[in-house]
Image: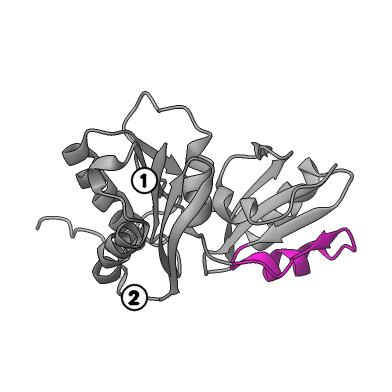
Amino acid sequence: MKILGLDTAQGACSAALWDDGSIIARRFELMRTGHAERLMPQALEVMEEAGVQMSDLDRLACTIGPGTFTGTRVALSAARGMVLALKIPLIGVTTLEVVAAGLEPGAGKIRVGAFDARRGELYVQAFEGADLLPLTDPQLLTVAAAAEAVAHVAASGSIEIAGTGAGLLVEAMDSGEVRAPDVKAHPDAVLVAEIAALRDIPDLPTAPLYLREPDATIPEPK
């Protein structure tokens, strides 16, 4: 099975090709803007490097948020267009699960994805086990509330946190059992594809996960 993974939801742009158990080509670039211009060239570079045609793909996978409003839509819109043309399934993966998957699993360890959502808030979700069983829903919380929520589901054992909000959450929790290892703070399409390989095909269309309303609003008619 061949899966093309895509991500543009946070501060990076990436594409990766998974083929029967291993990643055979990948691109990852940190960037604050320009995701829309870079994503498809990355995807084509990955496919060319692997010697794989788009028609050879069995699945597409992409992050669905939480992330920036525009960034989340870039990869998802591109993926939706591709699956319509190729007539293959699309698997959506949250950015929180992707960064948590970058942490090493361990017995009794809680893995947490946390992104700095600004305004003193975090996007946060906690997982346990090698298969990343969710302990909480993806949430938008104040830093203090996020620390309380994670502490509540991790009454014992160690906690490791990944993401751009990891440092804020570690500081708020103020415990020797809480660490932020040196792993990627932004989602990587490598992990998007690897997670999607283990997922069932969804019954419903893949939709973006927005935990905050967009800042831009349509003015009320006069």
Q: Earlier in the sequence, mark 1 or mark 2?
A: 2
Q: Is residue 135 above or below residue 39?
A: above
The residue at 81%/44% (across/down) is 154
Instruction: Name the mark on residue 33.
Output: 2
Query: In the rendered view, how is the structure colored?
Result: one colour
Give how far across and how far down residue 209 sits, in percent: 41, 46
Give how far across and how far down residue 17 sits, in percent: 41, 52
In-front residue for pair 209/149: 209
Give how far across and how far down residue 106 sits, in percent: 81, 47
Q: Magenta span has 183? A: yes
Q: What residue would you read off at disc 1?
A: 208
The number of numbered badges drawn on the structure is 2
Furthest residue toward top? 203
Is residue 157 found left or right of 16 in the rendered image?
right
Q: Is residue 76 above or below residue 144?
A: above
On the image, which quarter does residue 1 sit in?
top left
Which stretch is magenta? 163-184
Instruction: Name the mark on residue 175.
Output: none
